[in-house]
């Protein structure tokens, strides 16, 4: 389905499950689409864990452009799409590469309960001084980063709320089984944590 945003229509590909425990919204990389192997693998793992998935195509891709829009436009379009999808179930956001950056920058505003980053681009290739680690460090909820061992965009360190799983490959993360296994090992625990937190917030019966 198409969703209007401040910067043109975005497109959402829904992969729903019955009685979903959460909704995982994923964005694509700067020059790629939602058919990337790691996004497909993450979608499969999420559906198996009882989580619905929405894959979001940014307006510039829907319009047929390959060059990404500026960060503030990506963030604004992403926020519009996620808010359009509603809040019937708990929200988990994420994406691959540039899409992961968008998810990190907007997680707090959108109330995401966890963040999934596939091939987070820590810095431009060969320029470690131009770090983007602050975007990842700003995430206040549990996060999983799945990174290729030879990724020229660098590898982020683990942190108190951040788990980093390094798999064979580079920035493309074409080892779908490894991505799927990493997400499958992390996501069910997040669903259980979110479910327990929601249960504790419910008022006690009279």
Image: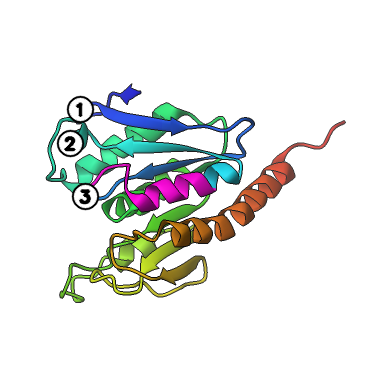
For marks 3 and 2 on the same chain, the one whose residue lies earlier in the sequence: 3
Percent coordinates x, y for residue 86 in the rendering: 48, 29
The question of residue 36 being in magenta is answered with yes
For label 2, the residue is 60
For marks 3 and 1 on the same chain, the one whose residue lies earlier in the sequence: 1
Say left or right for 42 vs 135.
right
- Badge 3 local density, few (<14 within 10 Å), some, or many (20+)? some
- Badge 1 local density, few (<14 within 10 Å), some, or many (20+)? some
For label 3, the residue is 30
How many numbered marks, from 0 up? 3
The question of residue 159 being in magenta is answered with no
Label 1 close to label 2 by CB (< 8 Å): yes
Measured in 3D between alpha carbons, the distance from the residue under mark 3 to the one under mark 1, in whole angstroms, is: 17 Å
Measured in 3D between alpha carbons, the distance from the residue under mark 1 to the one under mark 2, in whole angstroms, is: 8 Å
Mark 3 or 1: the one toward you: 3
Kindly identify which numbered label has been placed on residue 197: none
Residue 74: quadrant of the picture: top left
Q: Is residue 167 above or below residue 172?
A: below
For marks 1 and 2 on the same chain, the one whose residue lies earlier in the sequence: 1
Residue at position x 70%, y 48% in the image? 196
Residue at position x 23%, y 47% in the image? 32
Residue 7: quadrant of the picture: top left
Helix, strand or loop at label 3? It is loop
Helix, strand or loop at label 2? It is helix
Residue at position x 12%, y 45% in the image? 67
The magenta-colored residue range is: 32-45
């Amino acid at each position: 389905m198409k969703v209007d945003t401040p910067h043109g229509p975005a497109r959402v590909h829904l992969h729903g499950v019955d009685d979903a425990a959460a909704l995982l919204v994923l964005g694509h990389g700067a020059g790629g689409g939602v058919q990337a192997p790691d996004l497909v693998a993450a979608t499969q793992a999420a559906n198996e864990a009882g989580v619905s998935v929405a894959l979001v195509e940014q307006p510039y891709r829907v319009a047929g452009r390959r060059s990404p829009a500026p960060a503030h436009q990506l963030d604004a379009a992403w926020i519009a799409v996620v808010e359009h999808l509603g809040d019937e179930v708990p929200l988990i956001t994420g994406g691959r590469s540039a899409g992961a950056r968008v998810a990190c920058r907007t997680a707090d505003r959108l109330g995401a309960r966890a963040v999934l980053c596939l091939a987070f681009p820590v810095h431009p290739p060969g320029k470690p001084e131009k770090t983007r680690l602050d975007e990842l460090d700003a995430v206040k909820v549990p996060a999983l980063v799945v990174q290729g061992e030879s990724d020229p965009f660098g590898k982020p360190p683990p942190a108190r709320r951040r788990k980093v799983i390094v798999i064979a490959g580079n920035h493309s993360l074409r080892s779908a089984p490894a991505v799927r296994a990493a997400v499958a090992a992390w996501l069910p625990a997040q669903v259980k944590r979110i479910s327990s937190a929601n249960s504790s917030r419910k008022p006690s019966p009279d």
